[in-house]
Amino acid sequence: MKPDCKVIIALDVDEYGYALEIVDKLSSCIDIFKVGLELFTVAGPAILDEIHRRGKKIFLDLKFHDIPTTVSKAGVAAARKGVFMFNIHASGGMDMMKKCREDVVNVCLKENLPRPRIIAVTVLTSMSQEVLKAELGLQHSLATHVKHLSGMALKAGLDGVVASGHEAAMIKGHCGDKFLIVTPGIRPSWAATDDQARIMTPKKAIGAGADYLVMGRAVLNQSDPIKAIERIQQEISGS
């Protein structure tokens, strides 16, 4: 099976060795793996090196959110580690996003490094309209907030956003077709929903404009993960 360029497998595990077992097992059908907070805290940068040794790409999902200089330095460090893509929080503001992008671009040009895609987190897919209003005090709609943050990311020169499939079509319409959308909260019709509030099937998410689909438990909890990926590819293609 040809490695899927749209599906990103989330290595949301707490063991270095187990993470690499997953990469090795799915290497024939997956090209990009996500390293998030849990695995990075346990394994550190060494896990990035090992995944790269296997010829695979990395989406570094650490959601940088700090003062502009700190986020910029973290972004440069990610670029020097050769990650394919990393994310920062759009809610960190325009200055933070712009400085990170500019400093990463400059370092990559100066050191002849491939430039990673930099994407912004809009609203976590575990959050609902009720949470935004009752807990965060946002009076406008979730969709309006996502649209606003996506527009900020575009103006800051970022490559795209992390967003639910439910907002994908709106974001493409607002930011253009070349603006990347990385969509978590993807659940095939035959998988459990777990703790995601705003979920969507792979086929519907791609149809709405998502460029990359992030999946973890929906694949890894299956008795045959490779077969699950095949079913997802079939669902997307409609075959």
Image (spheres, helix red, strand yellow):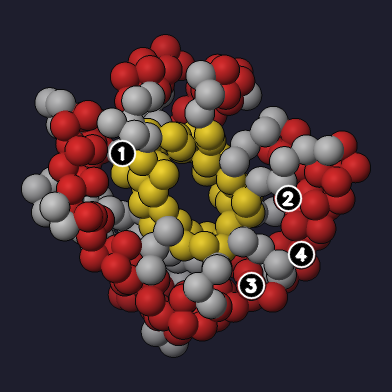
**Res 113 quadrant in image:** top right
Q: For mark 4, what is the residue?
A: 98
Query: What whole-number distance in Å separates the C-alpha atoms at marks 1 and 2?
Result: 26 Å
**Which label sits on residue 154?**
3
Residues at discs 4 and 3 in contact (Cβ within 8 Å): no
Q: Secondary structure at mark 2?
A: helix
Q: Residue flagged by tag 2: what amino acid is it?
A: Val
Query: What whole-number distance in Å separates the C-alpha atoms at marks 4 and 1?
Result: 31 Å
Q: Residue flagged by tag 3: what amino acid is it?
A: Leu
Task: State the residue at coordinates (85%, 46%).
Answer: 109
The one nearer the camera, 13 or 188, is: 188
Q: Earlier in the sequence, mark 3 or mark 1?
A: 3
Of the 4 image quadrants, the one containing the N terminus is top left
Query: What whole-number distance in Å separates the C-alpha atoms at marks 3 and 2?
Result: 18 Å
- In-image side of 205 versus 81 (left or right): left
The x and y percentages for residue 9 are 37, 37
Residues at discs 3 and 2 in contact (Cβ within 8 Å): no
Q: For mark 1, what is the residue?
A: 216
Q: For mark 2, what is the residue?
A: 71
Q: Earlier in the sequence, mark 4 or mark 1?
A: 4
The x and y percentages for residue 52 are 57, 24
Q: Earlier in the sequence, mark 1 or mark 2?
A: 2
The x and y percentages for residue 66 are 70, 53
Task: State the residue at coordinates (23%, 60%).
Answer: 203
- In-image side of 20 versus 191 (left or right): right
The x and y percentages for residue 181 are 46, 62
Tell me if mark 4 has few (under 14), some (14-19) or many (20+) residues whose alpha carbon lies within 10 angstroms of its own. many
Query: What whole-number distance in Å separates the C-alpha atoms at marks 4 and 3?
Result: 10 Å
Q: Residue flagged by tag 4: what amino acid is it?
A: Lys
Q: Nearer the viewer, mark 1 or mark 2?
A: 1
Any part of residue 115 in sight: yes
The one nearer the camera, 150 or 64, is: 150
